[in-house]
Image (spheres, helix red, strand yellow):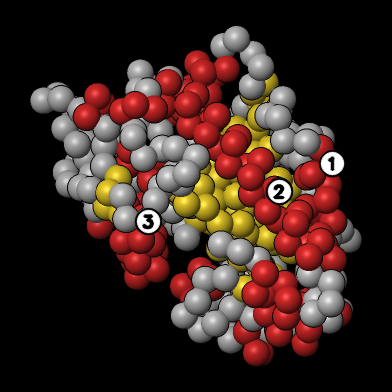
Amino acid sequence: MTNQNLLDLNSLQELPESHAWSSLDNSPSYGSSSPDQVPVINLNDPNAMKLVGHACKTWGVFQVTNHGVPTNLLEEMEDAGRKLFALPIQQKLQAARAPNGVSGYGVARISSFFPKLMWSEGFTIVGSPYEHAHKLWPNYYSQFCDVVEEYKKEMNKLAQRLMLLMLGSLGVTMDDVKWASIQGSTAALQLNSYPACPDPDRAMGLAAHTDSTLLTILHQSNTSGLQAHKEGTGWVTIPPMHRALVVNVGDLLHILSNGLYTSVLHRAMVNRTQHRFSVAYLYGPPSNIQISPLSKLTDKVHPPLYRPVTWSEYLGAKAKHFNKALSTVRLCAPLNGFVDATDHNGVQVG
């Protein structure tokens, strides 16, 4: 479906056949009754580095509190995003993503890999939000732009803090990763809207996928829907927590850690009565920097599992190979029997 043919999901009273999924997945799905719960880490805890490392190895996802991002800024960003998605569909299409573009309004970019469409709409911001915001609000765009820029600044600071903890738990310092500076990073914002759905049991908000990032920081509204997949457990709901943020390990950090940190499969389910909103900060290296397993993590017993790859190159592999992207840059089979998250049979990934 092209952006020009987008349906106004907010006005539909029945689930159209184009959005009706025959099977959402056969693995178990758990809410609060899960035998395992996604870790919640207080970043002011003296043991935060150890806790973050353990969460990265066992889950690939965790929630953080005392993260330093002002609560009012999270609320302002959510309010700005909700106002954007509440605009009439024809107005939103004024800022539609170009056919081969990245920024702008439209359906999930992984949609082309699936026979059915997802019950969601998105707005991607790479670089300045001005061009698209000006199309949405010709006379009222500055407030949106100001909130986005402030949000990106605070998220970048948090991403730096998290990278210090993640690398530190592996015995690696920022000096070992010279490009990992505030000036050197690349990032994007992804705003997601999941309207209330008339038939949520047959709809998919966002199909299961791993992120191509180093890490992703997600703010989710107070409506549940986010789920992570854990081997041996199945799908586990990550409940919204006031003032907490969700952190995902992405494919590039999986490569950087030589497979020690799990690139987590996650998806978004929808709700019959409540609208859900989220905003993801997608953090990566400079687009031309090659990412490869850190030398401190490799030796004769633990050879590098992946070849060097830039983020731009990897995004191309993701767009082409989808659920086999990690496999396309893998050098050899790991000695510990690890299987790439993107190789799971029966679980669709993005």
Q: What amino acid is found at the position of numbered circle 3 in the picture?
A: Ser
Question: For the residues marked 1 and 3, what is the alpha-carbon distance in whole angstroms?
Answer: 32 Å
Q: Are marks 2 and 1 in contact (CB under 8 Å)?
A: no
Indicate which disc, 3 or 2, sits on the residue closer to the N terminus.
Answer: 2
Q: Is residue 333 left or right of residue 345?
A: left
Number of residues whose C-alpha sits closer than 10 Å to that of mark 1, classed few (under 14), some (14–19) or many (20 or more): few
Decide which of 198, 307 is in the foreground and name it: 307
- Name the image quarter holding residue 339: top left
Observer-side mark, 2 or 1, equals 2
As drawn, the residue found furthest toward the bottom would be: 4
Name the residue rendered at 57%, 70% in the picture: 103
Question: For the residues marked 2 and 1, what is the alpha-carbon distance in whole angstroms?
Answer: 11 Å
| Tag shown at residue 150 | 2
- Name the image quarter holding residue 273: bottom right
Local secondary structure at mark 2: helix
Local secondary structure at mark 3: loop
Indicate which disc, 1 or 3, sits on the residue closer to the N terminus.
Answer: 1
- Name the image quarter holding residue 142: bottom right
* Residue 13 position within the rendered picture, expressed as x and y whole percent measured from the top left: 86, 79
Count up the numbered dots.
Answer: 3
* Residue 293 position within the rendered picture, expressed as x and y whole percent measured from the top left: 26, 37
Location of mark 1 (residue): 72
Question: For the residues marked 3 and 2, what is the alpha-carbon distance in whole angstroms?
Answer: 22 Å
Decide which of 224, 200 is in the foreground and name it: 224
| Tag shown at residue 154 | none
Name the residue rendered at 68%, 29% in the picture: 67
